[in-house]
Amino acid sequence: MKICCIGAGYVGGPTMAMIARKCPGISVTVVDLNEQRIAEWNSGELPVYEPGTA
């Protein structure tokens, strides 16, 4: 199964992070017009604080 989320903000980012973590059989892709936001999610430090995602 594959999921594509449009928007890596305060809802899309954490939601997709948890789906990716808890459901290894699902391929998760997140897209956003803001390249910096995607870079922050790909860095070693999460751009938002969401309990359970670190």
Image: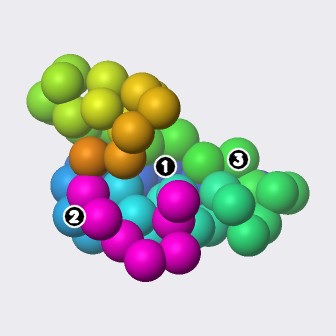
Q: Which mark is residue 12?
A: none
Badge 3: few (under 14), some or many (20 or more) residues near its Cα, within 10 Å? few
> Residue 43 sits in which quadrant?
top left
Which span of residues is magenta-colored? Answer: 48-54
What amino acid does circle 2 point to? Tyr
- Judge whether residue 21 is colored magenta: no
Amino acid type shown at disc 3: Ser
Q: Position of residue 29 (x, y in %)?
A: 52, 41
Q: Residue at x 14, y 30 (%)?
A: 34
Mark 1 or 2, nearer chain start = 1
Marks 1/3: CA–CA distance: 8 Å
Callout 2: SS? loop
Q: Position of residue 8 (x, y in %)?
A: 28, 49
Residue 4, label in figure: 1
Return the residue nearer the eye: 47 or 34: 47
Left or right of 54 on screen, residue 19? right
Q: Judging from the image, what secondary structure is the residue with disc 1 in?
A: strand
Q: Is residue 11 above or below residue 48?
A: below
> Residue at the location (20% across, 22% down)?
35
Q: Residue furthest bottom?
A: 51
Q: Residues within 10 Å of mark 2 (few under 14, many from 20)?
A: few
Gap in angstroms between the C-alphas marked 2 and 3: 20 Å
Look at the magenta stretch and give its main secondary structure.
Answer: loop
| Magenta span includes 52 | yes
Looking at the rendered image, the disc whose residue lies closer to the viewer, 2 or 3, is 2
* Residue 6 visible at all: no
Above-or-below relation of 52 to 7: below
Q: Amino acid at mark 1?
A: Cys
Q: Residues within 10 Å of mark 1 (few under 14, many from 20)?
A: few
Name the N-terminal-most of marks 1 and 3: 1
Foreground: disc 1 or disc 2: 2
Circle 3 is placed at which residue position?
27
